[in-house]
């Protein structure tokens, strides 16, 4: 930058301000930007005030509950973003991850019902190849995931496959066909008509969560009779074992959960699509050696998975 052209000299700039600029430009909201940067909103406002003084331009003006960039900010954004990204990649290349010696803690977001089938094999695997590493799991709503990942509080997430914003990366983890769990007293053939007319118990993580199968039925213009709802497939299977309710879940997960029960696993009579689960991470972790290693381990275990999973409810 050249002070003769009305712009500040790079020698006089606080380079930390460029990080603030980048986050505010991307989020268009000071509150979210402060959370990502782990500072107060007033600190973000103070940084913007310094930038405005040095560039002699407002850079961001208030619009509704957020801010919108000025013409100068639009010109600066790609240059600042590219420069910070190249610096980030350079520093990452200097820090190789050694799973046999590292002692960091990874945080993975996944719904409670997925812990039973994904967490045990991952922890057993890490005990052998990364004994010093730890894993914490957390349930994070999809609407909050990008912010949590950008802030570095979540390393990876397992969620139902869906379109994502540009800042999130994803890869397919696995797919699972659905089946129907019925109690020991169930007899006869489970037809489409009988499935729709029967009473069901559904599993949903959130109070207003919509189950995967109900969303799929809705796309077909169909609706079933859900009379009970809970948050856990083990609890739902126990209810099925003592009632005439039906439960829909992925087949391999059903085999695992119902192994000690007398429940029957029936073929899904409707052509509902298989459940697709994806692995998600933030763009800032794309080239991080530790995050990349963990992604590889999770994907490899999923490919060899013999226990199955069931999709979380949709918000």
Image (spheres, rainbow, N blue to C red):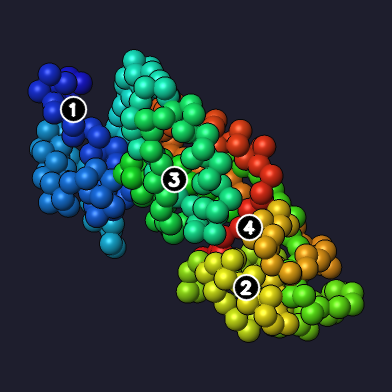
How far, Cα to Cα, is label 4 from label 3?
Answer: 17 Å
Give the mark nearest the N terminus, 3 or 2.
3
Q: Which residue is drawn at 55% across and 37% down?
A: 298
On residue 310, which mark appears? 4
Dot 1: element: loop
- Observer-side mark, 4 or 2, equals 2
Badge 4 crowding class, 10 Å Cα cut-off, few under 14, some 14 to 19, many 20 or more, is many
Give the mark nearest the N terminus, 4 or 1.
1
Q: Which residue is drawn at 63% across and 77% down?
A: 239
Tell me the residue that label 1 is attached to.
15
How far, Cα to Cα, is label 4 from label 2?
Answer: 17 Å
Q: Which residue is drawn at 36% across and 49% down?
A: 148
Q: Is residue 189 above or below residue 287?
A: below
Measured as percent of width and height from the top left, residue 122 is found at 52, 39
Badge 1 crowding class, 10 Å Cα cut-off, few under 14, some 14 to 19, many 20 or more, is few
Tell me the residue that label 3 is attached to.
108
Dot 4: element: loop
How far, Cα to Cα, is label 1 from label 2?
Answer: 58 Å
* Residue at the outermost right position: 188
- The reply to whether discs 4 and 2 touch (Cβ–Cβ < 8 Å) is no
Tell me the residue that label 2 is attached to.
238
Q: Residue at x 31, y 50 (%)?
A: 28
Q: In this view, does 25 lie above or below 93?
A: below
Measured as percent of width and height from the top left, residue 41 is found at 17, 52
- Observer-side mark, 3 or 2, equals 2
- Observer-side mark, 3 or 1, equals 3
Front-most of residues 185 and 289: 185
Give the mark nearest the N terminus, 3 or 1.
1
Q: Is residue 188 above or below residue 99?
A: below
- The reply to whether discs 4 and 1 touch (Cβ–Cβ < 8 Å) is no
């Amino acid at each position: 930058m050249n002070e003769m052209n009305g712009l500040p000299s790079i020698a006089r700039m606080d380079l930390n301000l460029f990080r603030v600029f980048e986050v505010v430009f991307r989020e268009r909201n000071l509150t979210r930007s402060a959370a990502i940067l782990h500072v107060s909103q007033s600190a973000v406002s103070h940084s913007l005030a310094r930038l405005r003084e040095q560039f002699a331009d407002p850079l961001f003006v208030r619009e509704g509950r957020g801010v919108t960039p000025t013409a100068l900010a639009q010109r600066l954004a790609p240059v600042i973003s590219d420069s910070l990204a190249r610096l980030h990649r350079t520093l990452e290349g200097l820090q190789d991850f050694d799973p046999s010696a590292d002692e960091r803690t990874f945080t993975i977001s996944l719904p409670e019902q997925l812990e039973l089938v994904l967490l045990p094999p991952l922890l057993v695997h890490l005990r052998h190849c990364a004994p010093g590493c730890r894993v914490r799991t957390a349930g994070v709503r999809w609407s909050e995931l990008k912010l949590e990942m950008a802030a570095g509080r979540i390393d990876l997430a397992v969620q139902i496959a869906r379109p994502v914003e540009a800042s999130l990366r994803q890869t397919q983890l696995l797919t699972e066909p659905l089946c129907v769990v019925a109690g020991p007293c169930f007899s006869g053939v489970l037809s489409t008509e009988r499935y729709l007319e029967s009473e069901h118990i559904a599993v949903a993580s959130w109070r207003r969560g919509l189950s995967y199968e109900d969303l799929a039925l809705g796309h077909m213009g169909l609706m079933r009779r859900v009379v009970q709802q809970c948050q856990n497939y083990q609890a739902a299977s126990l209810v099925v074992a003592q009632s005439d309710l039906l439960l829909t879940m992925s087949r391999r997960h059903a085999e695992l959960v119902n192994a000690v029960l007398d429940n029957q696993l029936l073929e899904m009579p409707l052509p509902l699509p298989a459940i697709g689960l994806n692995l998600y991470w933030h763009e800032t972790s794309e080239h991080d050696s530790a995050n990349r290693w963990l992604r590889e381990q999770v994907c490899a275990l999923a490919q060899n998975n013999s226990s199955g999973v069931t999709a979380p409810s949709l918000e």
